[in-house]
Amino acid sequence: MRKLRYGIIGAGSNAERKHLNNYMNIPNVELVSICDVNIESANRLANKYNITNIYNDYMEMLVNEELDLISVCTPNYTHEEITIQALMQGIHVHCEKPLAVNADSAKKIVEAKNKSGKLVMVGLNNRFTKEALTLKSFIDRGCLGEIYRAKAGWSRRSGIPGRGTWFTNKDFAGGGVMIDLGVHYLDLALYLMGMPNPTYVTGSTYNHFNNSTNRNRNGYRGNLNGVFDVEDTAIGFMGLNNGASVQFEFSWASNIEKDVTKIELLGTKGGASLINGELKIYSEIADTCVNITPILDSTSHLMNEFDHFVQCILHGEELISPAEHGVYMMEIIDQFYESAIRKEPIHLS
């Protein structure tokens, strides 16, 4: 079987740590080309991973390299243009989250995907952890019963991804912590619940660390002269069309003891929590309340995500995180921001 010709657009830490390190170890994939507007960054990774074709213009790469598959690991505002151009060239796309900066932009990607007949997968890597996959299996088998309440959160003490970089510029990122961290854990909670449609969304945003010089995330450089016009904290609540509700809270920086990620689900037969990666199930056995901590293997979840996309391309398996799910999430985020601006709930038809 011919190997899939793979190229990557973007040469940052996420591109290397996740995409290159995983696609290079899949037997059916051949690393062909890399592109970054910063040619030095592209050269650095090309030398490290023995990639011979290097570009600083992504269109040149798409046209010249006869690629089957690309990763898009670039700032949020570029996702729509790059993904659509790749689809027009007949290339499958693995796009980092968020799919786009808003729902309208995400819908254009889906339209282009449908016309092209190619696949687009959103990089929602938390769906692929062994804990999340196990919990999804429990839920699908009815172990929790009907889930009627959920909580989702990701709070950092010092975790701004580079003050004054594109992450903190609304024109480039589309938003702040809600579109950065919120996409991960609100998505996971709703995915585990079966992705019911929201009936209303209410949200509040705060920006109290925009002038801070010591709350950057480790490894991220800031720019004191750069723009910081997005929220560092996002808090909200959603009602769903099945009667369930979701409470969520996300922060890049906050005066807490330590960082925390969490999903909590309450069902009619049982509950579950996924806190800092540890899965626990709460249920009853013989009229006795019990807490269960599943014993899971240590297989890397990131390889599952990348190998899954390759299997979907080669064998037609169903995508776990298709582009349509990216639209679903961006519609919710758009309504969240609208609620925060208007300071009232947004009711959806």
Image (cartoon, rainbow, N blue to C red):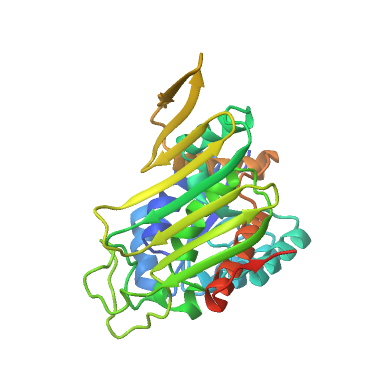
- Horizontal side of 307 relative to 212 (left or right) equals right
Can you say which quadrant of the picture contains the N terminus? Answer: top right
Q: Where does the image place residue 13, in percent across and percent down from the top left?
A: 36, 60
- Horizontal side of 92 relative to 232 (left or right) equals right
> Is 17 located above or below residue 75 in the figure?
above
> Is 137 located above or below residue 322 in the figure?
above
- Horizontal side of 254 relative to 116 (left or right) equals left
Would you say residue 192 is visible in this rendering? no
Q: Residue at x 51, y 54 (%)?
A: 247
Would you say residue 117 is visible in this rendering? yes
Q: Where does the image place residue 241, in percent across and percent down from the top left?
A: 70, 51
Q: Where does the image place residue 82, in percent across and percent down from the top left?
A: 59, 69
119 or 222: nearer the viewer: 222
Count all numbered tags in the image, as a single digit.
0
Q: Where does the image place residue 113, in percent across and percent down from the top left?
A: 71, 60
> Is 207 located above or below residue 14 in the figure?
below
Give the residue furthest to the bottom: 225
309 or 263: nearer the viewer: 263
122 or 68: nearer the viewer: 122
Q: Residue at x 44, y 38 (%)?
A: 273
Can you say which quadrant of the picture contains the C terminus? Answer: bottom right
Give the residue furthest to the left: 214
